[in-house]
Image (spheres, grey):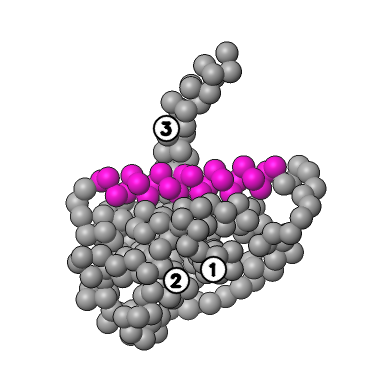
């Protein structure tokens, strides 16, 4: 009986992840559209628009997921810094999902077409704009995952502003007309969402002891961080 139930869960899990990811993406687009004009008036650049409140996210579980996906290349401190950087962007989980698909969180990743760093950004395409925006100073900065997070946010924002469609923006990000890339990103996004929310709900219902990369106090204080 138990084996039968587990098989059914495994069979439906990809569909559940895909549905959750679609909901997140739709929510992200709605929030972005409502907030974009106000953000530009305030700062002249992208502000902090989050689909999920920081206080409702279990960053410790996300950090463990990131470290595991990186093949232990990232230390605890590096994973914590990466996640903090991502949560100071408009769409933190989406950015973390892109890093998973692009490089499995490998800060030193390089491709045959010249894409660099964790987010596989092509300096020949985006370097000048990123430098003009004050995000990077040179190509080497794309290997700094903290600066690369901001670079990824900048590129996604620009592509979305041009296309008005997140799926199309993702295709342009990777430089392909195929939908497989977007599906991979959405799948990873769904995994991150489920991991963060399930663990958060469990911790809300009981007291959790022991040390972690993040405490509840840290999570609250991080809401006030700015770039």
Instruction: Work out how far the residue at label 1 is from the one at label 2, CA to CA, in angstroms.
Output: 9 Å
Chain-order first, disc 3 or disc 1: 3
Local packing at callout 2 (Cα closer than 10 Å; few below 14, some 14-19, many 20+) is many
Chain-order first, disc 2 or disc 3: 3
Q: Secondary structure at mark 3?
A: helix
Q: Is residue 196 above or below residue 226?
A: above
Residue name at image x 53 percent, y 23 percent? 6
Percent position of residue 22, x then y? 42, 42
Q: Secondary structure at mark 2?
A: helix
Residue name at image x 28 percent, y 61 percent? 173
- Residues shaded magenta: 179-202
Badge 3 vs badge 1, beta-carbon distance below 8 Å: no
Which residue in the structure is indicated by mark 3? 15
Q: Is residue 199 magenta?
A: yes
Q: Which residue is farthest front?
A: 72
Percent position of residue 160, x then y? 33, 61
Instruction: Work out how far the residue at label 2 is from the one at label 3, CA to CA, in angstroms.
Output: 31 Å
Q: Quadrant of residue 201?
A: top right
Badge 2 vs badge 3, beta-carbon distance below 8 Å: no
Which residue in the structure is indicated by mark 1? 78
Whether residue 103 is visible? yes
Which residue in the structure is indicated by mark 2? 145
Badge 1 vs badge 2, beta-carbon distance below 8 Å: yes
Instruction: Work out how far the residue at label 3 is from the one at label 1, CA to CA, in angstroms.
Output: 32 Å
Please name whichever residue, 46 or 72, is drawn nearer the observer in this view of the structure.
Answer: 72
- Our reading of the magenta stretch's main secondary structure is helix
Q: Tell me if 160 is positioned left or right of 220 in this view.
A: left
Q: Tell me if 47 is positioned left or right of 53 in this view.
A: left
Chain-order first, disc 1 or disc 2: 1
């Amino acid at each position: 009986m138990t084996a039968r139930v587990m098989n059914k869960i495994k069979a439906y899990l990809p569909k559940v992840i895909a549905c959750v990811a679609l909901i997140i993406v739709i929510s992200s687009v709605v929030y972005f559209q409502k907030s974009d004009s106000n953000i530009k008036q305030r700062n002249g650049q992208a502000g902090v628009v989050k689909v999920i409140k920081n206080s409702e996210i279990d960053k410790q579980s996300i950090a463990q997921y990131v470290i595991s996906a990186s093949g232990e290349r990232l230390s605890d401190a590096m994973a914590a810094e990466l996640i903090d950087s991502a949560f100071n962007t408009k769409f933190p989980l989406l950015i973390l999902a892109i890093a998973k698909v692009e490089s499995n969180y490998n800060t030193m990743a390089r491709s045959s077409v010249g894409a660099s760093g964790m987010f596989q950004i092509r300096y020949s395409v985006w370097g000048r704009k990123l430098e003009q925006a004050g995000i990077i100073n040179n190509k080497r900065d794309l290997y700094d995952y903290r600066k690369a997070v901001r670079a990824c946010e900048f590129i996604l924002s620009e592509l979305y502003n041009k296309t008005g469609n997140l799926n199309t923006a993702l295709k342009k990000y990777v430089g392909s007309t195929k939908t497989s890339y977007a599906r991979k990103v959405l799948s990873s996004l769904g995994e991150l969402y489920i991991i963060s929310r399930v663990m958060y709900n469990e911790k809300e219902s009981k007291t959790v002891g022991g040390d972690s990369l993040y405490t509840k106090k840290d999570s609250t204080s991080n809401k006030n961080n700015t770039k």
